[in-house]
Image (spheres, rainbow, N blue to C red):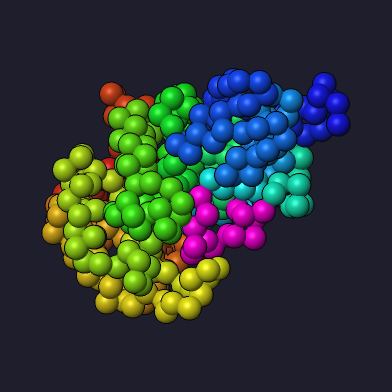
Amino acid sequence: MEKQNYQGKGNHHASYREKLAGDTVRCILCPHCCILQDGKTGICRTRENFGGELYSKSYGNPCSISVDPIEKKPLFHFFPGSEIYSIATAGCNFHCLNCQNWSISQELSSEQRRYNLSPDEVVKEALLHNTGSIAFTYTEPTVFYEYIFDIAKIARGKGVKTVMISNGYINEKPLLELCRWLNAANIDLKCFDDSIYKKLTGGRLQPVLDTLKTLKNNGVWLEITNLIIPEWSDSPEMIKSLCRWLADNGFKDTPLHFSRFFPNYRLSQLHPTPESSLVKAREIAEKAGIKYVYIGNIPDLHGENTSCPACGHRLVERDGYLVKQNDIKASQDEKNPFRKGLCRYCGEVISGVWA
């Protein structure tokens, strides 16, 4: 393949790279900082060195497209009850042993069916489907950074919100640039032990914690998911440490979703998370001062309803992904372009972005 034709075959110049000696390139998009010889791809398998230039192989090539309830992401305090246009490309910069979407996250983009949608076309499709927002989800959005960046800029001009469902493994500079255009994110905080993080995902804990702070400090609406995996991340002491860190670092108003694990991929030998472990996790989080704590993947526990942290009234009732009742009043905040939520019963401010 001739170098001058490489970009024209569905590839796109990658951002955040450093030229090293000869044709060697360092990718500085995520904390892996992969050093790539000519012809090699990084850990994510989506960024390739070709002739001393770094390319993204994901640009404009989503492998999965769907219209989902926004609660599926999960985002419970960001336009609840709305639908969101969801896209993903193949690849991921983690190799999680418990991956739910391993068939696309751990595959090369060339091995997946692709839809070939430009950023303009993605925004047009979202509007045609009457969705007010776009989610970058299913796999890891960081690996198709240039694509989501261009989509988010165009979407902002059309009044369409953009949301990133991510593992949070991204360097600060590219994240800060993205924060200028991004509206919301749900970050999957895998556990609160660095050695387990490395074994479970191939990544490290601290960069994810840094991402949480960056998003929070730059006005991106944030929710956090913690999957409780038996034998890996179900220790009450670990959950206490996680919740203490969140409380001590300004995340008491940030919704925290404890999610039930089901055996999959390379952890198929484990059992699903016991209900008691999730109930205990919620108790620990609430005791630490986290105001909005949810339990996912167990409908019988009714752990997905939103209650007022002041008066205790149920404000949003959910049945799976269906919002059956919403008693949050939205009022314009003069200091914030979003609408803030108020409890209909006592007037308490309910953190979130409300329609």
The N terminus appears in which quarter of the rendering?
Answer: top right
Number of labels in the image equals 0
Residue ID at (65%, 32%): 37
The C terminus appears in which quarter of the rendering?
Answer: top left
Q: Position of residue 16 (x, y in %)?
A: 54, 25
Residue ID at (24%, 43%): 251
Residue ID at (24%, 50%): 344
**Residue closest to the eye, 251 or 269:** 269
User: Is 104 in the magenta?
Assistant: yes
Left or right side of 306 for 299: right
Against 263, residue 316 (above or below) is above
- Magenta residue span: 94-107
Q: Position of residue 71 (x, y in %)?
A: 45, 55
Residue ID at (43%, 25%): 173
Task: Kindly indicate the quadrant of the structure image that contains residue 320.
Answer: bottom left
Q: Position of residue 221 (x, y in %)?
A: 37, 38
**Residue closest to the eye, 161 or 344:** 161
Task: Kindly indicate the quadrant of the structure image that contains residue 155.
Answer: top right
Left or right side of 10 for 289: left
Left or right side of 155 for 246: left
The dominant secondary structure in magenta is: loop
Observer able to see residue 309: no
User: Is 120 in the magenta?
Assistant: no
Against 106, residue 46 (above or below) is above
Q: Position of residue 262 (x, y in %)?
A: 46, 72
Observer able to see residue 296: yes
Left or right side of 159 for 53: right
**Residue closest to the eye, 216 or 120:** 216
